[in-house]
Amino acid sequence: MEQLTTIIQGCINKQPRCQKLLYEQYYGYAFKIVFRYIYRYENAKDVVNDGFVKVFTRFDKFSCEESEDQEKMLMGWIRKIMVNTAIDELRRKNMIPEIGGIPEEVWDVPDVGQSAEQQLYYKELIVLVKELPPSYQVAFNMYVIDGFSHQEIADKLNISIGTSKSNLAKARAYLQKKLNTDIPEIDVCSS
């Protein structure tokens, strides 16, 4: 706890050593957030780096008293910046879908906050979400995973609330259908 407080204070004071420590500690966490929005590994890495530039230039705006929740508050603040940076990148590219599979090195990015089982479920979910059309994918990520309201989604993406709700409903329907078809049926009546 004390070490995190020291790192945060060092980042506020723009100390490169503390910035490097924070970057290394939370890179995996930030990458997984960005990768939900950005298809390509190389592009996602660039967006994460852009996000960390924003984190470090705006660290004076981060306020958190030393407490048990300090890391949670920091992670929430980083998450918000990473999501906004990814959405800005999508808007800049007019939400043009990128094609291609998910390279295996994506799953090699360490995130110390996840167990092996969580990483497996995360990987399966992301593979399915990546199959969604871009507008459905963004709505699903923002609403279900990142906790934005439909109003916030509409404001950030310059769409109507109804469009946000429709995109989410279609994303959920697609994912439910996909999950139901991927699960083999078990005949419980035969023995």
Image: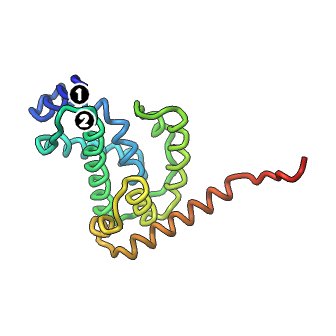
Residue 51 percent across, percent down from the top left: 25, 46
Q: Amino acid at mark 2?
A: Gln
Position of residue 83 in the picture relative to residue 11 (left or right): right
Please say if 155 is above or below 15. Answer: below
Callouts 1 and 2 close, C-beta under 8 Å:
yes
User: Who is closer to the viewer here, 176 or 149?
Assistant: 149
Position of residue 10 in the picture relative to residue 138 (left or right): left
SS label for mark 2: helix
Judging by the rendered image, the residue that carries numbered circle 1 is 4
Instruction: Report, in whole angstroms, how far the alpha carbon at label 1 lies from the one at label 2.
Output: 8 Å
Judging by the rendered image, the residue that carries numbered circle 2 is 70
The residue that appears at 33% across and 36% down in the rendered structure is 27
Please say if 135 is above or below 82. Answer: below
Q: In this view, which residue lies farthest toward the front?
A: 68
The residue that appears at 17% across and 25% down in the rendered structure is 6
Name the image quarter holding the N terminus: top left
Quarter assignment of residue 148: bottom left
SS label for mark 1: helix
Q: Amino acid at mark 1?
A: Leu
Residue 118 percent across, percent down from the top left: 51, 38
The residue that appears at 9% across and 32% down in the rendered structure is 13
